[in-house]
Image (cartoon, rainbow, N blue to C red):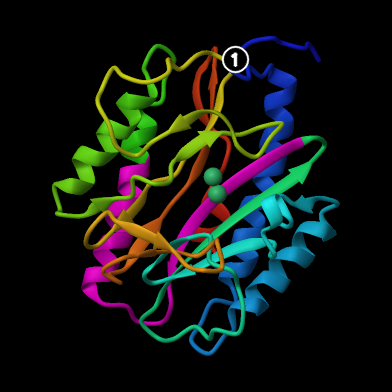
Amino acid sequence: MKIRKNKYKIYDTEEIQLIRESSLIVGKTLAEVAKRIAPGVPLMLLNRIADEFIRDHKAEPSFKGYRGFPSSICVSVNEVVVHGIPGNQILQDGDIVSIDCGVYKNGFHGDYAYTFPVGNISVEKQLLLERTKKSLFTGIEQAKVGNTTGDIGNAIQRYVESFGYGVVRDLCGHGCGRNLHEFPEVPNFGKAKQGPLLKTGMVICIEPMINRGTYKVKTDPDGWTVRTIDRKPSAHFEHQIALTEKGTEILSTYEFIENN
Ligand code: MG
Ligand code: MG
């Protein structure tokens, strides 16, 4: 493996294959957690299931201990946007819950997220989930060599703001491979043709965090839990993408979650 003194982390085919393997474990972990999502389930149980599943696959949870984060996954319910710490809270019928998972294996990180309904959810929340997921794929369509991060953010922002939703500004997507968070930042808003250029060999996570109300968020005193300031619900979907010579490849997959 070559050492590159590039500002961008550029990955070769072998490295991308290893990232793909880590990402695959994320997908299977999310599916394992999804099986247990139901009213009455404590969030810490979901964390335990994920932690055991990841370690059973001879991998490590990327988030555990990352800048002191105490858990193996982020579990974010309703108005919690991201970085929720799974504790004693019990899932309720009508909640939505985002599970964000990172897996480290063979020197590379996989990282992606999905937001699930708990029992029967309102039409309002259902639409928020559908449109946030759609916005992720709208962003991915712009994730190609020669475009910029601004092209991705702009496409996501235009799509979700057409429904009156708020795009979180304080957090964004990122490069991801040898390190969990790498250059470039990938905002979910912005102007087309602006921001860093996307190049062959880059691996990025695109992760729209979309609020039913205002885009404004605030972090709890725990230093992690990010909430909408108007306490309206927020959804979060994330995929990990490689820009290869053959085109854009989604390394992550919702297959195990959605075909269960
Ligand atoms: Mg991420
Ligand atoms: Mg993530």
Quadrant in which residue 69 is drawn: bottom right
Residue 259 visible within the image:
no
- Residue in the picture at 59% in, 78% down: 43
Is 40 on the left-hand or right-hand side of 45? left
- What residue lies at 75% left-to-right and 21% top-to-bottom? 14
Q: Position of residue 195 (x, y in %)?
A: 37, 21
Quadrant, the C terminus: bottom right
Viewer-side residue, 197 vs 46: 197
**Could you tell me residue 253's position as x and y percent?**
55, 46
Residue beneath disc 1: 7
Residue 103's place in the image compared with 14, above or below, is below
Q: Residue furthest bottom?
A: 40
What residue sits 26% from the left and 69% below the top?
230
Q: Is residue 257 above or below residue 242?
A: below
> Where are the magenta residues, as a range?
108-136
Question: Is 123 inside the magenta-drawn segment?
Answer: yes
Image coordinates of residue 184 in percent, x first then y, are 51, 26
Q: Taking 247 as reference, is 62 left or right? A: right
Instruction: Say whether residue 244 is left or right of residue 121.
Output: right
Residue 141 at least partly seen = yes
Quarter holding residue 126: bottom left
Compared with 36, 1 (above or below) is above
Furthest residue in direction front, as rendered:
221
Q: Residue at x 18, y 47 (%)?
A: 161
Q: Quick one: SS at disc 1?
A: loop
Q: Amino acid at mark 1?
A: Lys
- Counting from the top left corner in percent of width and height, residue 206 is at 45, 38
Depicted 26 relative to depicted 147: above or below:
below
In terms of depth relative to the viewer, which is nearer, 208 or 80? 80
Q: Magenta segment: does it hold 8?
A: no
Taking depth in this image into account, of 16 and 99 the one nearest to the observer is: 99
Q: Quadrant of the N terminus?
A: top right
